[in-house]
């Protein structure tokens, strides 16, 4: 019998999310609180204004959502100073990544994104049968825009740049982005994926919406999943010139953003207090974690996000498992080709302290780690931790 599934799908490895709390509790039989520092969610929870708005709207669940998401898009357009027609919303920003692939790339054409970048770009390329070109990361776990530029082929339609980059947390700054944008031609679409935009140092960060307003072939992606604390509702948004939005509208499924998510997001956009508190918690937590990681001699990448990328001199599997046993879920990055690294979300003060205490205990037994890690074929000794 001939296989029923499209054979190209063999290249698709399903996305592996951070382990859910319920799963860890079930598998390890843990009773004590489990800290999820694996998916870069907001440790403060959702915006209280959003929670209130959602409570009021629950009784209308029988009604389809507004397919156009009119009030939400209007609010986003006003807040960010773009036209209504330049806004697109999706079931998480990942849906917009897929819509871009479906709308612009034929099978056999190519998509470019840096190695060690958000894995969904690769999954979407494989899903639609496009070639995925993956030039290496630069120094200090940063995306190298020159290398990325040189990887673009005549058949490249989309270039995805996660800025700041997930999973390394590093940012590209205004001048280098400007230089890259001056070099780039009109025959590709550059997608600036700014899921962690609200956490960055704005004095140095590029204003990519400027390129949208200029009508360049640029898409800027943002999300309500991170600082707004609405990951569970699935809502991402993006900005692009009208000609690009028009194409995306054609590949969009009806009612792709649910009713509750639209209502929550409209309220959350007004919640400056929640935004400020969330940012402060992350900045303070990050300073604490960086100081402690230095003390423990654990190398990390400079983060402009709500997570920290740490890289051990040996396979991180044992550390990941040991943290899990202590009720702390982090994100292993072997699937991103970083077998020695973990990505750790900045949590509440208490969660951060618990993490450091656990790391300290685990690393205390260096001899044991070394024996376990010796088999992992990764060079480096825990002595150099
Ligand atoms: N882009 C990047 C760079 C991300 O890190 C994430 C979340 N992991 C997303 C997009 C997806 O966010 P959303 O929840 O909006 O789909």
Image: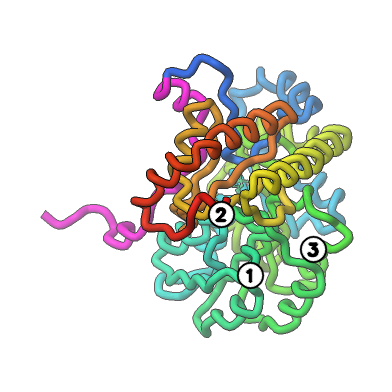
Along the viewing direction, whichever of 243 and 269 lies nearer the viewer? 269
**First in residue order: circle 1 vs circle 3:** 1
Residue farthest left in this picture = 1
Quadrant of the rendering where the N terminus is positioned: bottom left
Characterize the local packing of mark 1: few (<14), some (14-19) or many (20 or more) Cα atoms within 10 angstroms.
few
Which residue position holds label 3? 209
Range of residues picked out in magenta: 1-28
Image point 56% across, 62% down: which residue? 100
Decide if residue 60 is on the left or right side of residue 124.
Answer: right
Residue farthest top in this picture = 31
Gap between marks 3 and 2 measured at Cα: 44 Å
**First in residue order: circle 3 vs circle 2:** 3
Residues tagged 3 and 2 counted as in contact (Cβ below 8 A): no
Image point 75% across, 58% down: which residue? 85
Which residue position holds label 1? 139
Which residue position holds label 2? 384
Image point 49% across, 42% down: which residue? 366
The mark tally for this picture is 3
Q: Is mark 3 on a helix, strand or loop?
A: helix
Residue 137 vertical placement versus 344 (above, below): below
Ligand 1 under 8 Å from disc 2 Cβ: no
Residue 78 vertical placement versus 129 (above, below): above
Image point 53% across, 26% down: which residue? 327
- From this viewpoint, is residue 67 visible? yes
Residue 259: image quadrant is top right
Characterize the local packing of mark 2: few (<14), some (14-19) or many (20 or more) Cα atoms within 10 angstroms.
few
Residue 194: image quadrant is bottom right
Gap between marks 2 and 1 measured at Cα: 20 Å
Characterize the local packing of mark 3: few (<14), some (14-19) or many (20 or more) Cα atoms within 10 angstroms.
many
């Amino acid at each position: 019998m001939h296989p029923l599934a499209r054979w190209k799908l063999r290249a698709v490895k399903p996305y592996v999310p951070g382990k859910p709390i319920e799963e860890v509790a079930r598998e390890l039989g843990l009773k004590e609180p489990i800290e999820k520092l694996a998916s870069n969610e907001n440790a403060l929870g959702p915006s209280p204004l959003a929670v209130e708005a959602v409570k009021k709207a629950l009784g209308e669940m029988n009604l389809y959502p507004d397919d156009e998401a009119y009030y939400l898009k209007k609010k986003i357009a006003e807040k960010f100073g773009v036209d209504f027609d330049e806004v697109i919303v999706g079931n998480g920003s990942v849906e917009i990544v897929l819509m871009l692939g479906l709308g612009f790339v034929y099978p056999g054409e190519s998509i470019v994104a840096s190695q060690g970048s958000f894995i969904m770009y690769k999954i979407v390329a494989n899903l639609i049968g496009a070639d995925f070109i993956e030039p290496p990361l630069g120094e200090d776990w940063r995306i190298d825009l020159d290398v990325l530029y040189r990887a673009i082929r005549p058949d490249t339609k989309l270039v995805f740049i996660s800025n700041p980059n997930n999973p390394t947390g590093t940012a590209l700054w205004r001048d280098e982005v400007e230089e890259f944008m001056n070099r780039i031609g009109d025959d590709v679409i550059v997608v600036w994926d700014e899921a962690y935009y609200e956490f960055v140092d704005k004095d140095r960060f590029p204003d990519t919406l400027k390129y949208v307003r200029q009508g360049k072939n640029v898409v800027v992606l943002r999300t309500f999943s991170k600082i707004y604390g609405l990951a569970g509702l699935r809502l991402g948004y993006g900005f692009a010139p009208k000609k690009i939005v028009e194409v995306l509208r054609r590949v969009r499924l009806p009612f792709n953003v649910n009713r509750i998510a639209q209502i929550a997001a409209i309220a959350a956009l007004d919640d400056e207090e929640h935004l400020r508190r969330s940012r402060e918690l992350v900045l303070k937590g990050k300073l604490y974690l960086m100081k402690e990681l230095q003390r423990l001699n654990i190398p990390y990448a400079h983060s402009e996000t709500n997570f920290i990328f740490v890289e051990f001199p040996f396979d991180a599997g044992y550390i990941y498992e040991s943290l899990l046993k202590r009720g702390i879920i982090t994100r292993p990055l072997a699937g991103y080709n970083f077998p020695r690294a973990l990505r750790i979300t900045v949590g509440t003060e208490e969660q951060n302290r618990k993490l450091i205490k656990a790391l300290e205990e685990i690393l205390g037994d260096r001899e044991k780690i070394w024996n376990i890690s010796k088999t992992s074929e990764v060079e480096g000794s825990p002595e150099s931790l």
